[in-house]
């Protein structure tokens, strides 16, 4: 904690002066499902800390007699909110549905407390050790969706305000561009990245570290879950449970009859999502009429939780190969660490002189 | 339950009194008949309410079980991902250190997923700086 100048003068007569506080720069990935913070440690390696971006609204009756001292929670106005991982446990006890502070990659309009809850969790994640002071915090934002009327302006400004109130100097960075910064140093930060998230799919084309094209599509993992649930007549939670249990795009003959039907539907919707994203990328590249005659071949980097299904990379390679791209691609590969590469890219930008 | 029974008795009493007052008759058996009709209507309603409560408890139990299954799936997901993608697993499991952060400013502890990525970030930042300066 900082002290006033008078206090420091008094202390200097009785004890050794404390060393000057070190300025800490951070990278922050603000995702629909997870908040991930990356910071450089003393050895120059990257330390990752993450929180699940979920909460649960409870009232005094629900928690009567319970000791909240060891549970992640926040009191906002008259409400009590159980946060992050603890929210899962409380959802089980009370039989409640978990809430998210973000939807489709941006702050959720469904709960008036979303912003305050997000602020509490970000503050927790950005907590510094004693003797450190906040520097720059580069945070991820999605691109403007090209297939909906929404835009990122409100979300970006709210996050900037939250981070500056904590004491950091905020700087937004497109999440797909952050992937290029984290993954494409060997190609001089040139490449295409597609981030398949829960709420959105983000795309960026970056050449020599400069973003040439950034956009988002309002389809992602949630879109698959909702549509499969509608098609099969079940609930999205059940679809998610099957999707996350050893799922392969072309392997339907697993489990009982209902599970096989869900797997088959998942396969169709996964493939439709990939085809939609590849087609949209090509249309957008064509529509923007950009000069993409890059002298070098560039990689296509795939990231995001939705992309981790078995057979996903093979199918996207097949789709990429079946279409003529205006860019010369060297390879189609996964990001090295899909759970933290956006935060790492933000950190690299934050540490840039 | 006691409140419900009290409600029934008060309702029956009121029914008795109203009928007695408006009928302008002192025939006690008619008033008793009204009381019995009221009781006959209210007791099945109370039983129906109790059954609804039981049904709600059953539904709550089913919901709780479904949420538990969801939580189980969430917990096993990371392990399954790591099995499918062993090159990610090596880095993460080795350095995963769950930690609890101390309380401050009106909120309580929050569990963080913490780990270290064996990668030098300074060189990447320097390269990005020089690229963006056009060097």
Image (tube, helix red, strand yellow):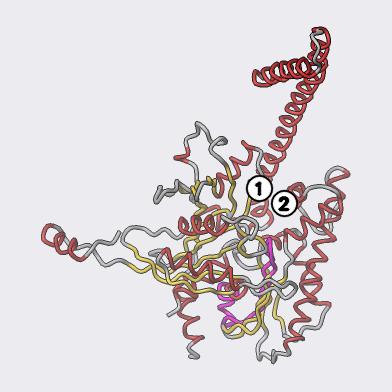
Q: Nearer the viewer, residue A56 or A35?
A: A56
Which residue is painted at 69% across and 44% down in the image? B70
x, y percent for residue A160: 50, 69
Question: Disc 1 designates what residue?
Answer: B74
Q: Secondary structure at mark 2?
A: loop
Given contact means CB atoms under 8 Å apart, are the residues at marks 2 and 1 in contact? yes
**Quarter containing the N terminus of chain A:** bottom left
Q: In this orientation, does residue B111 appear?
A: no
- Seen in the image, is A132 located left or right of residue B25? left
Q: In this orientation, does residue B108 appear?
A: yes
Residue pushed farthest left? A13
Question: Disc 2 designates what residue?
Answer: A244
Subunit of label 1: B
Q: Quadrant of residue B85?
A: bottom right
Stretch of the chain drawn in magenta: A179-201
Q: Is residue A207 above or below residue A86?
A: below
x, y percent for residue A32: 63, 60
Crowd tier of the residue under label 2, counting other residues whose Cα lies within 10 Å: few below 14, some 14–19, many 20 or above: some
Residues at marks 2 and 1, CA–CA distance in whole angstroms: 8 Å
Q: Nearer the viewer, residue A85 or A155?
A: A155
x, y percent for residue B92: 55, 56
x, y percent for residue B132: 50, 86
Q: Nearer the viewer, residue A272 or A69?
A: A69
Q: Quadrant of residue A351?
A: bottom left
Q: Secondary structure at mark 1?
A: helix
Crowd tier of the residue under label 1, counting other residues whose Cα lies within 10 Å: few below 14, some 14–19, many 20 or above: some
Asked if residue A225 lies in the magenta stretch, the reply is no
């Amino acid at each position: 904690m900082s002290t006033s100048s008078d206090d420091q003068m008094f202390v200097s007569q009785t004890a050794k002066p404390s060393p000057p506080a070190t300025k800490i720069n951070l990278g922050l990935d603000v995702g629909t499902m997870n908040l991930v913070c990356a910071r450089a440690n003393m050895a120059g390696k990257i330390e990752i800390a993450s929180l699940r971006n979920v909460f649960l609204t409870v009232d005094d009756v629900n928690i009567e007699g319970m000791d909240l001292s060891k549970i992640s929670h926040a009191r906002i106005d008259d409400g009590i909110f159980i946060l992050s991982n603890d929210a899962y446990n409380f959802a089980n006890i009370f039989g409640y549905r978990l809430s998210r502070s973000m939807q489709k990659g941006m702050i959720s309009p469904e709960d008036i407390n979303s912003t305050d809850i997000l602020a509490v969790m970000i503050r927790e994640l950005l907590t510094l050790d004693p003797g450190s002071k906040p520097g720059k915090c580069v945070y991820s934002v999605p691109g403007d969706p090209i297939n909906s009327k929404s835009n990122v302006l409100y979300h970006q400004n709210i996050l900037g305000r939250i981070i500056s109130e904590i004491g950091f100097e905020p700087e937004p960075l497109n999440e797909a561009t952050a992937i290029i910064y984290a993954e494409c140093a060997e190609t001089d930060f040139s490449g295409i990245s597609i981030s398949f998230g829960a709420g959105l799919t983000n795309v960026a084309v970056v050449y020599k570290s400069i973003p040439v094209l950034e956009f988002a599509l309002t389809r992602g993992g949630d879109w698959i879950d909702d549509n499969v649930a509608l098609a099969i007549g079940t609930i999205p939670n059940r679809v998610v449970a099957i999707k996350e249990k050893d799922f392969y795009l072309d392997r339907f003959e697993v489990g009982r009859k209902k599970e096989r039907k869900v797997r088959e539907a998942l396969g169709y919707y996964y493939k439709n999502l990939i085809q939609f994203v590849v087609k949209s990328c090509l249309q957008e590249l064509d529509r923007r009429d950009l000069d993409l005659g890059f002298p070098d071949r560039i990689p296509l980097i795939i990231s995001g939780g939705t992309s981790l299904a078995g057979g996903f990379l093979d199918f996207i390679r097949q789709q990429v190969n079946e279409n003529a791209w205006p860019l010369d691609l060297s390879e189609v590969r996964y990001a090295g660490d899909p759970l933290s590469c956006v935060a790492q890219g933000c950190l690299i930008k934050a540490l840039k002189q | 339950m006691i409140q419900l029974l009290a409600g029934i008795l008060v309702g029956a009493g009121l029914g008795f009194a109203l009928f007695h007052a408006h009928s302008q008759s002192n025939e006690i058996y008619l008033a008793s008949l009204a009381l019995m009709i009221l009781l006959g209507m209210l007791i099945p309603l109370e039983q129906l309410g109790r059954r609804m409560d039981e049904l709600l408890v059953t539904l709550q139990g089913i919901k709780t079980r479904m949420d538990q299954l969801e939580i189980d799936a969430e917990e096993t997901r990371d392990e399954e991902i790591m099995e499918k993608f062993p090159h990610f697993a090596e880095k993460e499991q080795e350095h995963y250190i769950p930690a609890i952060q101390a309380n401050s400013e009106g909120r309580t502890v929050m569990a963080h997923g913490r780990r270290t990525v064996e990668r030098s970030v300074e060189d990447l930042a320097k390269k990005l700086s020089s690229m963006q300066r056009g060097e």
